[in-house]
Amino acid sequence: MITEQTQVIQECAQGAWTGKFTFPEIVGRLAEIGVERYHADYSRQETTYYFPNGESLVVTIPHPTHETAAEFSPSAVEAAVRQSQRNEHTYPDFIRKTMTAGCVGYFVQITGRRVLYFGRNGECHVEHFPPAPVDS
């Protein structure tokens, strides 16, 4: 992994937290430097970024202090995702809402264009990336 890749990953992690970058911007920047997927682990308060060659980088970013619900609610996770898509809340708000929905983390599969949200007992909710806008 080169220094530029590390710098972009850290900028994306911080930019998500502060609201500097949107999810599509983050995914685009990560794809440009070769990140294949990343895993946001709420329990460990860290995100691991993976490259196709097996290299990875772990970035620690404190999450809101909030208890994760015991039961997983795919509909509540989906509602939080839709709010994010409409820019109706911050990333820390998104984390709190998905934790309230029983989510313990998620995988963003950049190359597969989907996000897998999962609960304590292996429950899973899959969101596909919205289609890219068509240029007219």
Image (cartoon, grey):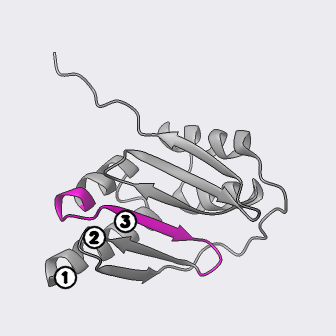
Q: Position of residue 53 (x, y in %)?
A: 23, 73
Q: Position of residue 88 (x, y in %)?
A: 55, 42
Is disc 2 surrounded by few (<14), some (14 to 19) or many (20+) residues within 10 Å?
A: some
Label 2 vs 3, first from the N-terminus: 3
Residue drawn at (51%, 68%) of the image: 40
Q: Amino acid at mark 3?
A: Gly
Instruction: State the residue in front, 18 or 94.
Output: 94
Q: CA distance from mark 3 to mark 1?
A: 21 Å
The residue pinned by badge 3 equals 15
Tell whether label 1 touches label 2 (CB within 8 Å).
yes
Residue drawn at (34%, 71%) of the image: 50
The residue pinned by badge 2 equals 51
In the image, is residue 114 above or below residue 63?
above
Queried whether the magenta region covers residue 5, the answer comes back as no
Q: Position of residue 131 (x, y in %)?
A: 35, 30
Residue drawn at (41%, 65%) of the image: 38
Label 3 vs 1, first from the N-terminus: 1
Q: Amino acid at mark 1?
A: Met
Name the element at disc 3. helix
In the image, is residue 135 above or below residue 117?
above
Which one is in front in this view, the residue at disc 3 or the one at disc 1?
1
Residue drawn at (77%, 66%) of the image: 68
In the image, taking residue 116 as reference, residue 99 lies left or right, namely right
The residue pinned by badge 1 equals 1
Q: Amino acid at mark 2?
A: Phe
Label annotation for residue 124: none
Tell whether label 1 touches label 3 (CB within 8 Å).
no
